[in-house]
Image (cartoon, grey):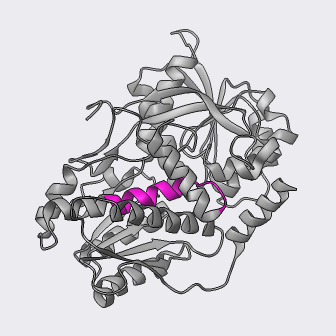
Amino acid sequence: MKKLTWLLTLLGCFTATNSQAEIVLGNQDKADINVGCLFPLTGRGGLYGEDSKIGIQLALEQLANKTDHYPSLKIIIEDSRSKASRATRLVKELVRDHQTRFICGVVNSSIAWQVAQVAEQENAFFIGTDHASSRMTDTGKRPLYFRVSNNTQQSMLAGAKYIREHFPSSASTPIKISYIGPDYEYGYTMWDDLEHALKQQQVNYEVITTLWPKLYEPNYFTFIQALLEKPTDLIVNAMWGGDLVTFIQQANSAKLFQHARFANFDTGANFEVLAALGEDMPEGLILASRHHNNWPDTAFNQWFVSRFHELSGRYPSYAAEGAYSGIMAIAEAVHLAGVDATNEELQTVLENLVIKLPEDPTGFSSYMDANTHQLQQVISIGTSTKDTSLPPAARLLHNWSVYYPDRRQSH
């Protein structure tokens, strides 16, 4: 019954169609800085927007407890409805009508690409909190764009290291890898990043097949059969959200996980997926997420997860910590540069940003790469293991492999 209730709640978040007015958090009157956030609050991605809203509330709680003087923030959250035309129009309205100096959020990578262009035209900073395509930070630096969650390049580099460590190969015996990812920018970028990382890590591998189902595909049996027909050591999956839930359920029926090891190195262990699957989540899958509710085992992460649960009655998806990170990054930058700082001064501060986040293990703080404007973070990969401590999930990750950024290890 608990699993059914969760699934109904999840589907309700995904399929709601009612229009939702803007949400205003923080200082409602005269704030030092206005921030405009774009998240899907309705439709299939509504859960990410709801979790992001609560993550922002937690950031505001933290800022209220700061002993130093931090800027007061007025945060206007708009429903992007996962549509690029609406999101780009909202950017202009937020900057021109609400004098927002910062735009934050955006779940879909294709939409984020367009939002970044419009925000730059409007001379506003765009703090990316959820989308992951490495194209945003690879194809020429955008001076006003900064991302505070893992991108696909980082996730796939950690994945390649994991493969090198756990799937031994030799010059004569390459690792047989099959890949299945969504047929849009995120899926293709993920595969490009994985191949680049495997070569960088000098992994000897052979591509067995690459498959590209449409986003929101309802039936994966043809793709699963294609995977079953060929001998494979590892299937790498790049789906997320409801698509990944559906794929795993159908793969269970087809006994795919008895055919080969299975990995999803970017979003596979998002709590939304673990909760929706419950007992249907197999044990032994190799998974990661941009934030884990049970790792690291620090007081900070425990506070974040438990306080989120107090406010919502459920545990957070990674979108919550991404939105939390975005607001804390904005507040820290304005705190250091000053409320009246120029864009150039704020850019310099953001390029040198060091910030402690719930996902950071003891002895490490996330830090910005000044060249790419991509936050550098520790990525942890584990295997799905029976664990009912965070219901309705029946599996959580354990047996961790932890990967620090290459250039700097701690602060």
Res. 143 in view: no
Q: Give the quadrant of the C terminus.
A: top left
Q: Nearer the viewer, residue 362 or 282?
A: 362
Q: Position of residue 337 (x, y in %)?
A: 14, 62
Task: Say above or below: 375 vs 32.
Answer: above
Q: Position of residue 244 (x, y in %)?
A: 69, 50
Q: Nearer the viewer, residue 80 or 67?
A: 67
Q: Give the quadrant of the N terminus.
A: bottom right
Task: Name the residue: 29% across, 59% down.
Answer: 66
Task: Say above or below: 354 vs 36.
Answer: above
* Magenta-colored stretch includes residue 315: yes
Task: Name the residue: 38% across, 59% down.
Answer: 62
Please identify the quarter of the rendering in which residue 99 is found.
Answer: bottom left
Q: Position of residue 39 (x, y in %)?
A: 50, 71
Relative to 11, is 359 on the left or the right? Answer: left
Span highlighted in magenta in the image: 313-328
